[in-house]
Amino acid sequence: MKTLLRITFVLAVTLSVSVGAQAQSGYTTGIGLRGGVASGLTIKHFIKSDAAIEGIISTNFRHRGAVITVLYEKHAQAFNARGLQWYYGIGGHVGFHDGRHYYDRDHKHYYDDRVVALGIDGVLGLEYYIRDIPFTIGADIKPYINIPSGGGFWDSALHVRYVF
């Protein structure tokens, strides 16, 4: 848990100190909630007008643990609609799970140790910036592969962010 707090602190400091250009969407940084199979906190910071870094701290109750994900995302206007953007990206994650709930899908074996999962993530999403209340709402699909245990998975989620 101390490692999780350290990584969270470093991520927050890095994103808050970064100086980026004003994004095409009209905001520089957004902080909010992500709800899906893996739910948690999300922060997105634009480093260029069409590129952002997103950090996600999430939990998956099925695997009883926490995951920290960092994504590099490219943004572009969607459907010629003002404030609507689609984005795609790639990144990685590190997760800390209870071994019994992470490995044992059929409840045939018990693992008492903690599991550290590393992996590669992708993301494809759509986001709308509501200028009047400064919030964004969006949805995305985030496929990922866990390297130690193998296998491919995906997570879909809705998110809401306060932007500034």
Image (cartoon, rainbow, N blue to C red):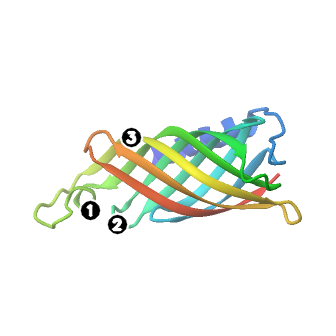
SS at circle 3: strand
Is residue 21 positioned above or below 29 on the image? above
Q: CA distance from mark 1 to mark 3?
A: 18 Å
Amino acid under label 2? Arg
The quadrant where residue 148 appears: top left
Image point (53%, 47%), residue name? 123
Please tell me which of labels 2 and 3 falls first in the chain: 2
Q: Secondary structure at mark 1?
A: helix
Residue 62 image label: 2
Question: Mark on residue 119?
Answer: 3
Task: Tell me which residue sits at (48%, 43%) in the image.
Answer: 122
| Residue 128 point in image, percent of width and height | 74, 59
Q: Amino acid at mark 1?
A: His
How far apart marks 2 and 3 lie (CA) works out to 18 Å
What residue is shown with label 1? 101
> Quick one: label 2, few (<14), some, or many (20+) residues within 10 Å?
few
Name the side, left or right, on which 128 lies relative to 21.
left
Establish if 7 lies above or below 112.
above
Q: Are marks 2 and 3 in contact (CB under 8 Å)?
A: no
Residue 149, how many percent across, how many down? 25, 44
Q: Position of residue 24 (x, y in %)?
A: 81, 43
Q: Are marks 1 and 2 in contact (CB under 8 Å)?
A: yes
* Farthest-out residue, left: 108
- The furthest residue to the front: 79
